[in-house]
Image (tube, grey):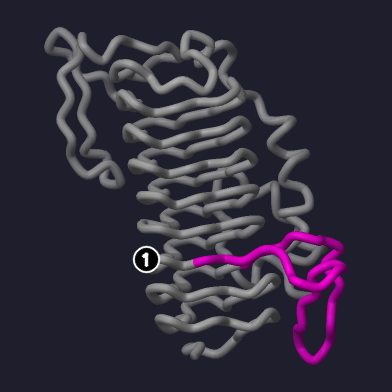
Amino acid sequence: MLSADILFDLKIFSHAPLFSADRPVWSALQDLKKYMNEFSYPADLFNCLADGVAAREHLVVYGGELIDGGQCHIEYGDTLRGELVISRAGKVLEGASLIMAGAVFQGNRIAIGEGVLVEGGATIKSPTIIGHRTEVRQGAYLRGYCLIGDRCVVGHTTEVKHSVFLDDAKAGHFAYLGDSIIGNNANLGAGTKCANLRFIPGNVQVSYEGKLFNTGMRKFGAILGDRAQTGCNSVTSPGTIIAKGSFLMPNTTAASGFHSVRKIG
C-alpha cells in the first residue's frame, strides 16, 4: 500500500492526524473537508472585514485581535526566517502577522499562524488554515479547503484549491494546485500545473507496483513527496505521485501513477 510514510516525514507536522497509516496516502484528500470543518477557528477575528472586499489598510493580527497597521512600525524581513518584525509604541509584537491593504477575505473560517505575511491582492476563501511564518504573495488565490503548513510560500498568481502544503513547501510563481498534497521542502517551479480532472469519465486511477488502484475520486491532482521538485512549466497529470527527492524536469508532463525514479522526463 502506498501510505503517507513512504512519501512524508510527519513527526512534527501540526496536522499529521489528517494522514492515516493504514490507508492510501490520497485518503488525506478524501478526509480534508471533514478535518477542516471540525477545526477550531478563531471566533469573529475577520468579522470586521467586509466579506469579499479588499482591506483598505494594513491590519496586524496579534493576540487574537486585528490592530490598525497604521499604529505599527513594520520591518519587512524574510518572513520564512521569522524576520517580519512588527512593533507598536516601541514594543515588538512577538508573533504578529500582517495582512496588507488590498488583501481579500471571504468567510470567517480562516486561521492565520504567527509571523505570517499576506500581501495585497491575495484572495483567501474560507475555510483556510495558514501555518506560522508562511508567505501568501500578491495575486495568490486560495479557493477554500486549503491547509498550508509552516514556512510555506503561496506565490504570485498561484491558485490553490482543496490542497495540503506540508511544512516548508513552496509554489512561488504562476502555479495551479487542485486536490493535491505537497511534501516537506518540496518546491514547484514557475508555471507548474497540477491537473486534477481527466478528460474521460470516471474516478482517477493510480498505478503502483504493477497494480491499478481506483482512488474513488473524480478530482485528484498530484502528490509530491518530501524534497520533490518540479521544473518550470511542468505539468502533472491527474493522479501523479512523485517520490521523495525526485525531480520533474522543466517543460515535462508526468503521467499518472507513482514515479519512483530520481529524474522524470
Q: Is residue 34 left or right of residue 251?
A: right
Q: Is residue 97 left or right of residue 7?
A: left
Q: How many marks?
A: 1
Q: Which residue lies at the image location 47% right of the left edge and 30% below the top edge?
A: 112
Q: Which residue lies at the image location 56% right of the left edge and 69% below the top edge?
A: 224
Which residue is identified by label 1?
A: 190
Find out whether residue 209 is within the magenta segment: yes
Find out whether residue 166 is within the magenta segment: no
Residue 95 visible, this angle: no
- Disc 1 residue type? Ala
Q: In the displayed image of the protein, which residue is found farthest to the front?
A: 199
Q: Is residue 188 above or below residue 151?
A: below
The magenta segment is 193-222
Residue 43 in which image quadrant: top right
Question: Closest to the observer: 123 or 80?
Answer: 123
Residue 9: image x %, image y %? 56, 63
Q: Is residue 174 above or below residue 109?
A: below
Question: Closest to the observer: 195 or 265?
Answer: 195
- Describe the element under mark 1 as helix, strand or loop: loop
Residue 159: image x %, image y %? 50, 50
Q: Is residue 252 above or below residue 126?
A: below
Residue 231 visible, this angle: yes
Q: Is residue 215 above or below residue 82?
A: below
